[in-house]
Image (cartoon, grey):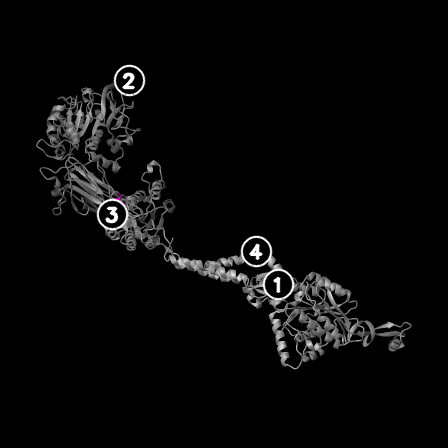
Amino acid sequence: MRLADLFRARDVSRIESLRLAARQAVEGLAVGRHRSPHKGSSVEFKEHRPYVPGDELKNIDWKAFGKSDRLYVREFEEETNLRCMLLVDQSGSMAYGGERARSLSREAQTSAAGASDSAAPWWNGTKQEYAMGLAAALSYLMLSNQDSVGVMTFDAKVRDVVPPRMLPSHLNVILNALVQDHRGGETDLGTVLRQASVKLPRRGLVVLISDGFGDVESLGRSLTLLRGGRQDVVFLQVVDPDELDFPFEERVDFRDLEATDRHEIIDARQIRDRYLESLKRHNDMIAAACRRNHVDHLLIRTDLSLVDCLSRFVRMRQAGPVSGAAHEAIQGGPSVEVGP
Amino acid sequence: MSLVNGVMALGAAAFVVPLAIHLLFRSRFRRLDWGAMFLLQDIVNANRRRMQWHQWILLLLRCAIPILLAFAMARPLLSSIGPLGGEAIAGESPVSLILLVDESRSMSAGARSAHAIESINELLDSMPRRDEVILISSSRLSAPPSRGGPRDARETLRELRFDGAPFDMAAALQAGVNACRDATHPYRRIIVVSDFQENAFANPDETAGSSFLASLEPIQDRLSGFQPRPQLDFLDVTDTNADASSLANVVVESVQIDATAILVDRPVSISATVRNDSDLPVVNVRAGWMIDGRVFDTETISLEPRGTVHLSWQTTFDAAGGASVGLTLEHADAIPADNRRELAVEVLSPIRVWLVDGQPSQEPLQGETDFLRIALSPYAFRASGRLANATSANGAHPTEPRDLVSTKVMSQRGLIKQLAPLVADDPARGRSSEAAEGPLPDLIVLANVERPPRAEDQDPLSRYLSAGGHVLFFDGDQVDPAAWADCEWLPAQIQSTIESQDSPFRIVPPGARLSVWQSLGDADESLFDPVEISQLRSLSPEPSSSSVWLRTESGEPLVVTGADQLRAATAPGDQTEEGNRDQGGLGRVMQFAIACDTSWSNLPLRPVYLPMMQELVLEMVGKDFPSSQLPGTPMVIPPISPPGDQDAAAWRVTASGGALQNLPVSSGSPLVFHETSIVGAYRFGNVSDLATDGDSVPQAVAVRVVDVPASESTLRSVAPELMEECIERLGADRYREAGSLVEATQRDRFGRELWRPLLCLLIAVMIGEVLWQQRGVLRAANPFTRPRPEAM
């Protein structure tokens, strides 16, 4: 799998132009653009400290000595690179692709067939494929910004783990891990996030890409655990437009993607209102859990192009809080829906 | 219920179409792999039963649509007149309509009668020719009802006068039920057309303590006995919007004669009461006093609102015979008919009494009948100056008052000699004839007569009684009880005499018990108190055929008469009873247990004796007939015979309005005249006498007056509660407009088509199906109203 198989050339150039910043201090292995909790050499002055034997003389602030007759050492903030871990949901529910998302994918394929740049034949409109593309784009973005990026796929449990690296060649490793087919089984986001938190020892950016279908309380507890580990967490909730507005009019045999033996034949019109009410309640609970744990929450419709979605996400991160929710942005992050 | 287009009902089978579609729809669905199954699962688990109900109701509505459509097109018909034996359907079966029309006088108030006629005509117009109409007028309940088709009934309606007797609701309903029994068609409908006045709901048997509602029970039972049960409707023609002024009315409440008997050439006082039944004063009303329908005197009266005026007038009659007196008012009001009221009277010649003295004497006051003769003819006695010549009223001076009674004393032999020729051949004829021997006496007094006439004398007294004569029997010491034991016409058996022991017998005053002697006192103050009886005859009256008028304080019968005479005397206002008195044509017999002289009592010497005997004679001789009677009740005329050699067929009656009618007169039997529905005076007599000659009023032998009680003029509707109770008990319907009644009859006859309500129901079900189907879908159909996650 190559990046060119996922995005057209002009989309790749647009991704390259993006720059994702961490909202808080992160710990990296290399010097980068992101604030580090450690002091180091940079142009950003942090504080004065009394001189102790062993300190380098070049760091003594002689002007302060002249004024106070005491030796002070100037300390500067350390700048490091971003360590980002992408948690990609590959559970059964992510396999759903509605008609509108498929239409978008067909448009993309049709336009790609007539264009000289690469196409996106891999995308059939499912949420999983959208999540995979989103993860790939984020990975490319990170690596192009000299940040470390890794990926962890999961369904009912953690499947593949690619540790964060900042090498350009690391992108292929990530892509190969993403395309591994582990679909099936039920999602348990809470359990998976608790497992993932063990494998994220240092403060960094955690991007959770999932449809969020599952136990919200468990998810909330896991987010709390991640936030306890000083992780900057972003939850990209990928949902199909059909799941948002339930457009079905006829009797439908709904077969569970996470348990094939479970199905219900229902007159879709009869339950639409109650479904939408239930979905809203579910999403409200997710948003509340994210707000409570200062987690940026983005609701992404799969009928939005990946690059547009990514650019909006990056702009939101760069601009800080969205929609005037300054307090929420500082405390954590707002829940926003990203769609066409 | 029947179906006009029954075949169309088969279309109801089309309900299988939505059923099949429903089942097919259930088997057709789209498979979809769905991720958010946990959201659906909670909804399905919580709403599975409700969704199943939704589906079932939806299926029911869809199946109902073709069924309703098919039934609407089949035109179902609801009718109380269903097919009988499958031979006819609703609308084809003829109906017998029994029309009970209130013809009472109150119906003539305002526009009630016109409204009634108009309503009935509207009803008749809506009826097919084959229907039967039985028209019963309330004034002719006992007469055979008018029977025919609607056209015949319309003709009969023109004869209604609405001036009849008070409407008797219970009797009218009974007549209606009787007519149902004789109706031709099985479907019967009774319609009572009336203004439903309060007096119509009075129980005729009120004395028995039963209420009017109780009298409805047998009617209700009889109605329920019919199969099918006749429908009963009340059509109220009272104009509820009529203002008070349109119902203002002045009525001649009563006309009365202030005398026991009216004699020729004797002044008589007539009084009348006029009542104003309105809240407006009535001024300058011309009131005219009438004799035989002609106004002889007038006066102008004014009446306060709700006030009454009493009028009186004095006149004399110059000829004996029947006559009518009355008062008429010239005033336009709600009920013109009650502005006139007449009274039937009989003008008598001086009463002829034969006194049969069983112990005659030439000495003054020693004869058996001397005291009685003085009591009956006091003026003649005074004019004569001596007892012996006081034999006739002719002895009185012309300028002095004349006696009511002329007496003639004779022995028993003389009685037989003079009476036998008069009653020998034709007793009925002899009474009013002027034969060579003289006319029959009005009363024969037997005073201390030893025995009745012998059989070889052909018993002239019995013949006399059969001819309508009257006998007054006084006891005495010469009376032989054994000889009188076989006399059939004496009301009591004569027993032995009883003498008083320590104290004389005293008379118990009759008081109000006897109207005849009511004026003589009662238990508190009585003219009988000074009367002392030393000896009397023990009488054994026949309990079944006689009654005791007077008793002594010890309980011994003193005056005995027949039972019918007691009823007449105790209930003088009961016109029905009085009417019965004339039916037999037999004379009356009064029997005294004492003598008519002073031998057994001092009664002849007491002031009570004269009025007592005068009143008694007038009561016995006076004609007992009703001064007026209700329309429709038969008139009974005692046996009359044309004078001389006139043919019996020449007698006629002049009905009210001047219509002449020949009468089937038969000698010796009373005449019963039934055609009395018209209010007014009916004059019976010889055709030559009744024939009008210029302005002269012909003299009639008898006059009867038909009139309506003044209470009928009081316009007061029945209490609504009583009316509602009556309607409920009888299962009747009440209508105020003919249109609604016609509509009801048409609905019952032709039924009520249900396709309109079925069509409305069909539309409602179709709308309901759409709404039910869209229930819960409508909100989802508009994406802008759906709950959505937070938007950017």
Parent chain of label 2:
B
Magenta highlight on residue B411: no
- Residue B49: which disc? 4
Q: Specify few, some or many for label 2: CA neighbours under 10 Å numbering under 14, 14-19, or 20 or more.
A: few
- Check if mark 2's residue and mark 4's residue have beta carbons within 8 Å: no
Foreground: disc 3 or disc 1: 1
Residue type marked 3: Ser
Q: Position of residue B761 (x, y in %)?
A: 44, 58
Marks 3/1: CA–CA distance = 87 Å
Parent chain of label 3:
B
Residue type marked 4: Arg
Foreground: disc 3 or disc 2: 3
Q: Position of residue A199 (x, y in %)?
A: 77, 66
Q: Earlier in the sequence, mark 2 or mark 4?
A: 4
Foreground: disc 2 or disc 4: 4
- Residue A166: which disc? none
Front-lying residue, A170 or B307: A170
Parent chain of label 1:
A
Q: Which residue is mark 3?
A: B146
Q: Are marks 3 and 1 on the same chain?
A: no
Relative to residue B514, is residue A243 drawn left or right?
Answer: right
Marks 4/1: CA–CA distance = 21 Å
- Residue B502: which disc? 2
Front-lying residue, B741 or B405: B741
In the image, what residue occupies the spot 9% across and 33% down? Answer: B435
Relative to residue B616, is residue A50 drawn left or right?
Answer: right
- Direction bottom: furthest residue: A116
Q: Which residue is mark 1?
A: A255
Picture quarter with the C terminus of chain B: bottom right
Q: Quadrant of residue B207?
A: top left
